Image: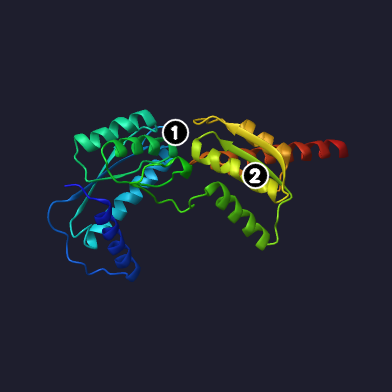
Amino acid sequence: MTIDRRSFSLALGTLGASTLWGTTSQAQPTGTPVRIGGTLALTGPLSSVGLVHKLTGEIYVDELNKRGGLLGRPVEWIVKDDQSKPDLTRTLYEQLVNSDKVDLLIGPYGTSAILSAMGVAQRYNKILVHHTFGVPPLAKYPQQFYGWAVGPEPDKSTPGIVLDALAAAGKTPKTVAIVTSKFPSVHYISLGAREVARQRGVREVLFLEWDFGNRDFGPVASRIKDADPDLIWGGALGLEANQIWTRSRRSTMRRAAASGSRRRRGRC
């Protein structure tokens, strides 16, 4: 059984209504399960985020089935580990379609992997619902549903929201350091932030990129410290932002300790 776009939209609308009104007394779903297949980065550089998506997805499917499932049928979610590799992602989506016989595809984590999944969905005329796709202009397949909250122009809307919020709080920055992974989605949005900041008169004091998979953020933190910006724009994935912040804090404490030591020696 294959779910077409109209049936999926109808089911999505019904699900939205039941969620909106907080219905909990739905009849138990019956019949053959609706099989939804996808991959997540459960290992590899993106695993810190992929594992969170897996846990959240499992909770959601459990709650969905308690509320009547999809089209009155129980939902079965088949998730495979793509190891943070777009090439492997393509192979696994082929398996989901041909071996697991899923009715609906849900996208993996990250732009590159989603593009791989989208190519498979298009080949087999399957609906693909996806999230975390940071470069919307690349999504050309008509049966793909873009579900990320950042909207169709994240390179404009996301930095705009941040700068608007700072202005509303009376903390409009004069300088910005833009540091970003070269991973497609965050890099695309960071380039947009660079342009939005320029248009708003925020002076760029640092623009720094790193290769996807980098784990040494000491040099990045050091460059940020030297630039001393009012605002740091971090195009970071998963734990990268935490690592940059931790390194920056350590650098600050070391410098403060060294400065204090020099002052003590001077007084002696």
Render colour scheme: rainbow
Q: Residue at x 28, y 69 (%)?
A: 23
Residue 114 screen position, x and y as percent? 39, 39
- What amino acid type should be assigned to the residue bearing mark 2? Glu
Residue in the image at 50% along x and 35% along y = 183
Q: Dot 1 corresponds to which residue? A: 45
Residue at 44% over, 33% down: 45
- Which kind of residue does numbered mark 1 sit on? Pro
Residue tagged 2: 195
Question: In this rendering, is residue 67 above or below 147?
Answer: below
Residue at figure coordinates x 40%, y 51% from the top left: 147
Pinpoint residue 28: horizontal percent, then vertical percent: 17, 62
- Please report contact status of discs 1 and 2: CB closer than 8 Å, yes or no: no
Q: Quadrant of residue 85?
A: top left
Q: Quadrant of residue 248?
A: top right
Image location (x, y in percent) of residue 104 = 26, 46
- Callout 2: few (<14), some (14-19), or many (20+) C-alpha neighbours within 10 Å? some
Q: Nearer the viewer, residue 190 or 258?
A: 190
- The quarter of the picture where residue 82 lies is top left
Q: In the picture, which quadrant includes the C terminus?
A: top right
Q: Residue furthest right?
A: 267
Marks 1 and 2, Cα distance to the nearest angstrom?
Answer: 28 Å
Name the element at disc 1.
loop
Q: In the displayed structure, would residue 215 be above or below residue 176?
A: above
